[in-house]
Each structure stands twice: as C-alpha cells, then as structure tokens.
Image (cartoon, helix red, strand yellow):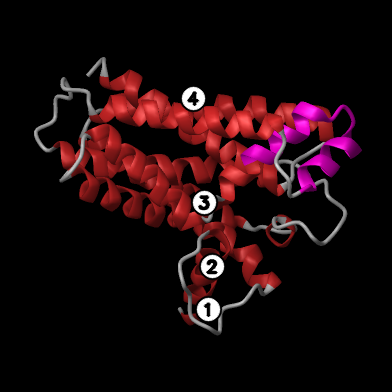
Amino acid sequence: MKKQIDIFFTALMFYTRIPCPKHINHQPDYLNKATRYFPLIGWIVGTISFLFFLGANFLFSNSVAALFSIIAGILTTGAFHEDGFADVCDGFGGGWTKEKILKIMKDSAIGAYGAIGIILLLLLKFLILSEIFNYSLLPFENKTLFFGFLFIVYHSISRANAISLSFTLTYVREDELSKAKPIAKAYSFVEVFGVMFFGLLPLLLFSFTYSFLFLLIIPVLVVVRFFLGRYFVKWIGGYTGDCLGALEQVSEVFTLLSILAICKFI
C-alpha cells in the first residue's frame, strides 16, 4: 500500500504543482507506474476547477465563473498540457521534416502557431463551458451536482484518452531530456487497467445518473485519438510528450462539445 501511495504522489508531483511529501522524487520506476493514476489526477484537477467555479459563481456570472475554473485548472497543472498543445502547434505548423518538427517542439520559446493555437483553444473551451453553464433548459433539478460531475468527467476521460496513445505508438525522441521520457518506456496490464478504470468510471457514473447518451463521448474520443495518432505517425513516426499534451487538450474540447450537444437532446 505504501508503494502505491508513493506512486500516486509521484504522479501528482509530475502532472501538477500540488505540494507532495519531500521523499517523493522522479524515480524512473515509479514514473513508469505513475501512468495508471494519470486520469485520477484528472479527478483532482476537475474538483479544484469545480470549487473555483462554485466560489466565483457566488459573486459573478456563470461565464466569469467558467473563466475562473479554467484558470484554476491551468494553475493546478502549471499549464503542463497547454504547453504541449502550443509546442505541437508550433512544431507541426512550422516544420516540414521529422527532425525540424522535433527541434521546434523542444524550443522553449512560443511561436505564432503556438500562440494562435492556445488562444483559440482556451477561447473555445471558455465559450463551451459558458454555454453549458448558461443553458437554462438543462432538465436536472440539482445543476450543481451536474456541473461537478462535468468537471471530473472531462478532466479524467481526456487524460485517459491522451495517455492511451503511449500504449500503442512509439516514442520518437532519442534523448533523455524530454519531460515524457520516463513514462514512455514501459507499461503493464496494471497501467492499462488503471488508466481505463480511473478514466471511464466518472463517465459511467455520469451517464448512469443523467443519460446514457453521454456514453457517445467514448466513440467521439476514439475517433479523435485515431486521427491525431495517425497524423503524428505520418509526420514524426510516433509521439512525444507534447503530442500527449495536445491530445489531452483536444480531448477536453471534444468532450465538452459532446456534452453540450447531448444536453440539447435530453
């Protein structure tokens, strides 16, 4: 049990800015195993975002509260996944060979493609959340519970979708400097089971509580994963940590879009 707790805290330290016990470090073996708790970290980030939404909603409109929830998620993770998305926009937007794409993505400076991409991503996420929160026809008595579920669902299922890419594609960087290298080398059935369990459980409970139509989110994300994965393989032969971050962010957007669309048919 102590080992599993240490592995969980390793995941928490690696994927968020939340303080962890001092004895936790970037031990490669634990980082490999920490993959299983990646969607569980989504539960935590989603809960924190939801609490910020509730607090802001007492004083401000739903739209302002939605913005605060996005800010809370970014502060909690240190923009870990948003940074990956921006790097992918720069790399694949400005590079025409595998070597050039990888070199651009490794550059810490953000370019025009990355800046434009992250602005549009965050704007889209804000508009979708605002519309969901302002959707007066939601047929649920306890909308607060629905919104709480929503935050945990879209943060957890998106992380599961992203990390699942590492189970089927090849990691393409040859250096040891990448932030994803320690978790890209190995995985076992336990990691796959953990990702699927912690990633799908909130969505299953959400669907059982409100509508089984929300299960349509799964095939939507499978399609997103397939096409992004194929795109990465076409240009660089596999994936990098930035690719996982980009897939996580795109999965968040498509999860929220799916929820918004499904709400109009319930």
For marks 1 and 2 on the same chain, the one whose residue lies earlier in the sequence: 1
**Label 4 Cα neighbours within 10 Å, binned few <14 / some 14-19 / many ≥20:** some
| Residue 213 image offset from top left, x and y in percent | 31, 24
Q: Nearer the viewer, mark 4 or mark 2?
A: 2
Q: Name the residue under label 3.
A: 195
Left or right: 108, with 3 as reference point = right
Q: Name the residue under label 1.
A: 3
Decide: marks 3, 4 in contact (CB < 8 A)? no
x 66%, y 34%: residue: 114
| Residue 232 image offset from top left, x and y in percent | 75, 32
User: In the displayed structure, would residue 25 be above or below residue 177?
Assistant: below
Decide: marks 1, 2 in contact (CB < 8 A)? no
Distance from label 1 to label 4 (Cα)?
Answer: 36 Å
Distance from label 2 to label 3 (Cα)?
Answer: 17 Å
Q: Name the residue under label 2.
A: 13
| Residue 30 image offset from top left, x and y in percent | 62, 71
Front in this rendered view, residue 265 or 133: 133
x 64%, y 44%: residue: 84
Left or right: 167, with 99 as reference point = left
For marks 1 and 3 on the same chain, the one whose residue lies earlier in the sequence: 1
x 34%, y 27%: residue: 259
Residue 192 belongs to magenta span: no
Left or right: 81, with 62 as reference point = right
| Residue 178 image offset from top left, x and y in percent | 76, 56
Type of the residue with mark 4: Val
Q: Name the residue under label 4.
A: 220
Residue 96 belongs to magenta span: yes
For marks 3 and 4 on the same chain, the one whose residue lies earlier in the sequence: 3
Distance from label 3 to label 4 (Cα)?
Answer: 18 Å
Question: Which circle marks residue 131 in the picture?
Answer: none
Which structural element holds mark 3?
helix
Q: What stretch is highlighted in magenta?
A: 85-107
